[in-house]
Image (spheres, grey):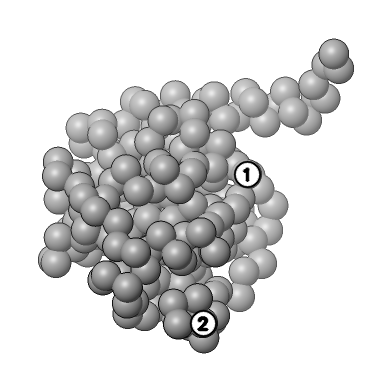
Amino acid sequence: MQNPSPFEDREHVALARAVGALSAGQVIVYPTETFYGLGVDFSVGGALERLFAIKAREPGKPVGLIAASVEMAFSVAREVPPAARRLAEKFWPGPLTLILPAAPGLPAELVGPEGDVGVRVSPHRIARALAAALGRPLTATSANLAGEPPARTIVEARAVFADRVAVYLDGGTMNAAAPSTIVACEGSRMRLLRAGAIDETQLFEILK
């Protein structure tokens, strides 16, 4: 059996530090397939309030989640419409956020005015490894102050948040041209809520 390389060892240590910070209710910065994200464990008291405070985000505007798998993503939904299952099968892991009826008991900060929650399965290995190690989805709001451009590098994120973030996980420069596409699913239909990395014609093609 081969020993892990020093790079793998360092990544394991960094992931362990990040999960420890999440479990303690702290905020981390981590790479996703689009931009850097701000992550907290929503099950820890005070974590979401801390996230909203450092991002200067309006309390009534919910944040989305990143999950490690389709099963984990759907665990935050009360039900999964057929359209959502078809889109997930085609585009997850990928930059597609599905808006689904929220499961009972989710914090109010994650739930939209219509009782829904946004979630995606990221193709980025660090984002998925974090969710897998945590055992539940983590928040995936972009690493920026509300209304400002999202951070594409750790340097940009540090310049904004400094020591208000407990752990910074460096994944290099994020070169995405657009954020995740956001769609709401109702029965066998979908509504495009935000154009993004996946073109809407691709989505509608799947649901024909």
Does residue 88 appear to the left or right of 104 in the view shown?
Answer: right
Residue type of the residue flagged with mark 2? Glu
Q: Quadrant location of residue 191? A: bottom left
- x then y, percent, for residue 23: 36, 26
Residue ID at (54%, 64%): 91
Viewer-proximal residue, 145 or 79? Answer: 79
Does residue 75 appear to the left or right of 91 in the view shown?
Answer: left
Kindly tell me whether residue 163 is visible in this rendering: no
Q: Is residue 16 placed above or below 89 in the rendered structure?
A: above
From the image, which quarter does the C terminus lie in? bottom left
Q: Looking at the image, is mark 2 or mark 1 nearer the viewer? A: 2
For marks 2 and 1, give the CA distance: 28 Å
Neighbour tally class for label 2: few under 14, some 14-19, many 20 plus, Cα within 10 Å: few
> Badge 2 is on which residue?
205
Residue ID at (51%, 59%): 89
Neighbour tally class for label 1: few under 14, some 14-19, many 20 plus, Cα within 10 Å: few
From the image, which quarter does the N terminus lie in? top right
Kindly tell me whether residue 61 is visible in this rendering: yes
Q: How many marks?
A: 2
- Tell which residue pokes out farthest to the bottom in this image: 201
Compare marks 2 and 1 and give the one earlier in the sequence. Answer: 1
Q: Secondary structure at mark 1?
A: helix
On residue 88, the disc is: none
Does residue 2 appear to the left or right of 59 in the view shown?
Answer: right
> Badge 1 is on which residue?
125
- x then y, percent, for residue 122: 53, 53
Residue type of the residue flagged with mark 1? Arg
Residue ID at (86%, 17%): 2
